[in-house]
Amino acid sequence: NEPAAGGEPAAGADDGVITLGFSQVGAESGWRAANTKSIQDTLTAENGFDLKFSDAQQKQENQIQAIRSYITQGVDVIAFSPVVETGWDAVLQEAKAAGIPVILTDRAVDAEDETLYESFIGSDFVKEGETAGQWVAENFDGEGLKVVELQGTTGSAPAIDRKEGFESAIEGSDVEIIDSQTGNFTRAEGKTVMEGFLNKHDDIDLVFAHNDDMGLGAIEAIEAAGLVPGKDIQIVTIDAVKDGMQALADGKINYIVECNPLLGPDLAEIAKAVIAGEEVEKRIVVKDEAFDQAAAKEALPTREY
Ligand code: AHR
């Protein structure tokens, strides 16, 4: 490739450096902040990367625009965490036609043609929901437990899959979801939706929040209503980021299923392999743990994120 005007090598130039365009979902949660940091800390010049990073502010149209701009720039690899599952075929076809490999991180796309991307690195969200639901059923089946659900962003893979996993795990028990609404994975919306639930229902036993941030927002709403989170109303969340783990250790959350955000090292490895023309695994499942209050106290001092 010719150098770009100004003497700098053009994006995608054969200079040994991998130019990678990354389109991030947004900055909606503590999990997302840790994920962004992992990517930016790993895809560095010292590690052979020129990272181009953009934040889509939870909007699919911004992500599509960013991906198109990476195609125009002729980057070596495109990676992104799709805000929602559907609607990617056209832009992925454009990347394929331009000969630019695509790697998915964190969230999946619902595309029939699996040749549109090289690899998908991320957690098993159905399993995360199942683990949360199993804990609830194991501890409360037989008590007629009433659950409210704070869902993640509508149409996103983690919201769809965690709901499915949780529902399948409580099936056959007398645990009942009495209300369910999206809080868009943010603390502020989690709080607002929980306030609405508390106004509408006086028999809530447990909150299942699709991420820690919405659970933390729910804690604020529960406390403002004069109730004790973790006791009057139990809380189960997913992520296990620092603030969530602290609330778990403090007794305000009852159980957290981890979703590991440290995807930078796997992304770097797969991008290098793809550029080297090596076969890569189509699906790389990131391992997650789960924590009760005692386990959170033990894990907190050495927790990375
Ligand atoms: O896609 C992963 C999810 O997105 C995390 O659980 C949530 O916190 C984030 O916003």
Image (cartoon, rainbow, N blue to C red):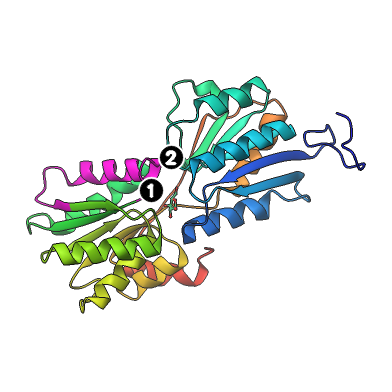
Identify the disc placed on residue 56: none
Nearer the observer, 278 or 98: 98
Residue 170 falls inside the magenta stretch:
yes
Three-letter code for the amino acid on which mark 1 is drawn:
Thr
Splitting the image into 4 quarters, where does residue 278 fall?
top right
Residue located at (89% from left, 38% from top): 5
**Disc 2 secondary structure class:** loop
Residue 75 rendering spot, x and y as whole percentages: 72, 35
Residue drawn at point x = 66 percent, y = 30 percent: 274
Q: Earlier in the sequence, mark 1 or mark 2?
A: 2
What residue span does the magenta drawing correspond to?
A: 152-178
**Total numbered badges shown on the rendered structure:** 2
Q: Which residue is the site of mark 2?
A: 84
Q: Position of residue 193 (x, y in %)?
A: 28, 60
Identify residue for label 1. Answer: 153
Q: Nearer the viewer, residue 47 or 185?
A: 185
Q: Position of residue 147 (x, y in %)?
A: 18, 57
Residue contact at pointers 1 and 2, CB within 8 angstroms: yes
* Residue 151 lies in the magenta-colored region: no
For the residue pair 258 and 58, the one nearer the viewer reads as: 58
- Can see residue 292? no
Residue at image coords 58%, 34%: 103
| Vertical position of residue 78 compared to residue 46: above or below | above
Amino acid of disc 2: Val
Label 1 C-beta lies within 8 Å of the nearest ligand 1 atom = yes
The answer to whether the beta carbon of the residue marked 2 is less than 8 Å from any atom of ligand 1 is: no
